[in-house]
């Protein structure tokens, strides 16, 4: 299950819906920079960052795979938040790969410092880039260290914190109580330790026994380190190619590739946005009530999202790389906010040429101009519709036209934020 755009497509709610039919829900990339929102049946909102979106289902075992990075403090906080909603979080229900890498406190401070200078990238300051950098340099710390004495690990934490204090002072940042930070980290390690397991062996054994595994991607296609709008990307593989490496399973085990597409395209952070809307009046209408569950603001950052028109040109490239077999469209209920007609980008003009598939870099995307086609909108409220045939004809035409443009079937249609607000085809 993969985001086909720039993130915020509604991956969490789709995973939450599909988890009812799955034995395992597994995260294979990223860390607590992700933000997936699940709306529980009673209407309460569950914001998840590192724990998979299947945690609200008793039938599913949730796995944080070896391709992820884990911040023990954020992990402990998230477990506490979930338990406050009355959802049990046990080692039988949640497993963390012993081969995943730990986010150390000074990695987050390094990102905080970097965001103050010319190298700022709109980071979530969750320590993502520096943790993955340490992993690539073979200088990282893996979760497996929790299975022995924590003393040497805590000394690494202390040394790391001490190493950045001079830079903090030079950038006008307040000093840090190092011993208190070490104490907090030590307590979080104790919370994390019971969940540590060899998840690759577990997932492969379950697959051999016929289990169904749902791989949950964090971030989205355009944020992929290899295929996204580099350098405005994350530090891990967000595409289907990252599943095998990020969970320790064979590529041949992948059967379906569900691409999540949001009808109201959005983005938090920097980078080129070919179909971005700058009309303040239209943006006010699109954003609407910013206090609602499905408001267009980042789950992790709280920042208001940049909004644009649906971009088929970019989705085609995501479909190609992910081997997408079907699409899930979210926020169809928001489409009428665009007005009586809906602009959809179906190609770009780039240096005098027409591109029907997006280029592979931020440098090229900055030079692209959108080419739009228009579809008719509808006035009816569709939030309680549960059958495709009951949608207004214009809404049906919108979906079938997207199928024609992408060459893929739309099998799930979101008409609201709740778990039940979906049309299954």
Image (cartoon, rainbow, N blue to C red):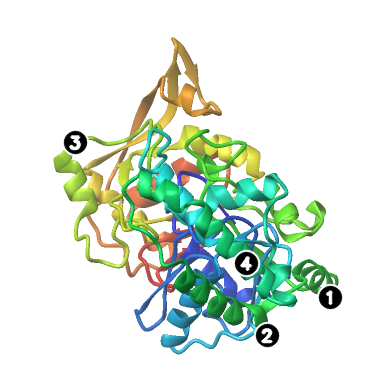
How many numbered circles does the render carry? Answer: 4
- Which mark's residue is nearer the viewer, 1 or 2? 2
Residue 155: which disc?
Answer: 4
Query: In x, y percent, where is residue 174?
Result: 33, 57
Measured as percent of width and height from the top left, residue 372 is found at 35, 28
Residue pointed to by mark 2: 92
In the image, which is nearer the foreground, mark 4 or mark 2?
4
For label 1, count other residues whose C-alpha is less than 10 Å away and answer few (under 14), some (14-19) or many (20+).
few
Which element carries disc 1, helix, strand or loop?
loop
- The disc placed on residue 279 is 3
- In the current view of this chain or complex, which residue is farthest to the left? 281
Identity of the residue drawn at 62% across and 56% down: 29
Q: Secondary structure at mark 2?
A: loop
Give left or right: position of 66 versus 311: right
Per the model, the C-alpha gap separating discs 4 and 1 is 42 Å
Q: Could you give the CA–CA distance between mark 4 and mark 3, rounded to whole angstroms?
A: 53 Å
Labels 1 & 2 near each other (Cβ < 8 A): no
Closer to the N terminus: mark 4 or mark 1? 4
SS for tag 3?
loop
**Residue 209 got which mark?**
1
Estimate the spatial distance between the alpha carbons at disc 4 and disc 2, rounded to whole Å: 31 Å
Q: CA distance from mark 1 to mark 3?
A: 54 Å
Position of the N terminus, as image quadrant, is bottom right
> Which of the numbered marks, if any, corresponds to residue 48?
none
Q: Position of residue 266 (x, y in %)?
A: 36, 46
Q: Are marks 4 and 2 in contact (CB under 8 Å)?
A: no
**Mark 1 to mark 2 CA distance (whole Å):** 18 Å
Q: Residue at x 38, y 30 (%)?
A: 274
Question: Camera-side residue: 83 or 222?
Answer: 83
């Amino acid at each position: 299950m993969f985001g086909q755009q720039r993130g915020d497509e509604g991956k969490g709610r789709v995973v939450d819906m599909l988890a009812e039919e799955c034995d395992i829900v597994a995260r294979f990339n990223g860390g607590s920079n992700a933000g997936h929102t699940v709306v529980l049946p009673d209407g309460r909102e569950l914001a998840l960052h590192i724990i998979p979106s299947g945690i609200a289902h008793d039938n599913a075992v949730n796995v944080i795979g070896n391709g992820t990075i884990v911040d023990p403090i954020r992990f402990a906080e998230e477990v506490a938040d979930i338990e406050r909603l009355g959802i049990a979080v046990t080692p039988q229900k949640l497993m963390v790969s012993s081969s995943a890498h730990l986010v150390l406190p000074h990695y987050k401070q390094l990102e905080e410092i970097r965001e103050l200078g010319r190298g700022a990238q709109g980071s979530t300051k969750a320590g993502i880039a520096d943790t993955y950098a340490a992993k690539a340099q073979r200088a990282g710390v893996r979760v497996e260290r929790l299975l022995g004495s924590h003393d040497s690990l805590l000394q690494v934490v202390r040394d790391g914190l001490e190493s950045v204090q001079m830079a903090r002072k030079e950038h006008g940042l307040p000093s840090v109580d190092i011993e208190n930070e070490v104490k907090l980290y030590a307590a979080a390690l104790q919370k994390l330790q019971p969940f540590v397991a060899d998840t690759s062996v577990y997932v492969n054994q379950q697959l051999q026994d016929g289990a169904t595994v749902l791989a949950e991607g964090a971030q989205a296609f355009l944020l992929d380190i290899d295929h996204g709008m580099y350098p405005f990307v994350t530090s891990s593989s967000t595409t289907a190619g990252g599943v095998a490496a990020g969970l320790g399973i064979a590529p041949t085990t992948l059967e379906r590739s569900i691409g999540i597409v949001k009808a109201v395209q959005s983005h938090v952070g920097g980078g080129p946005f070919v179909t971005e809307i700058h009309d303040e009046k239209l943006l006010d209408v699109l954003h609407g009530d910013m206090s609602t569950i499905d408001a267009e603001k980042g789950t992790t950052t709280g920042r208001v999202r940049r909004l644009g028109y649906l971009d088929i040109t970019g989705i085609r490239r995501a479909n190609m790389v992910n081997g997408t077999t079907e699409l899930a469209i979210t926020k169809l209920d928001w489409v009428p906010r665009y007005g009586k007609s809906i602009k959809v980008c179906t190609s770009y003009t780039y240096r005098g040429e027409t591109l029907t598939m997006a280029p592979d870099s931020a440098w090229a995307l900055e030079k692209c101009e959108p080419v739009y086609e228009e579809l008719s909108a509808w006035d009816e409220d569709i939030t309680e519709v549960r059958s495709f045939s009951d949608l207004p004809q214009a809404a049906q035409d919108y979906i079938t036209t997207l199928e024609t443009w992408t060459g893929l079937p739309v099998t799930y249609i979101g008409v609201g934020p709740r778990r039940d607000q979906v049309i299954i085809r």
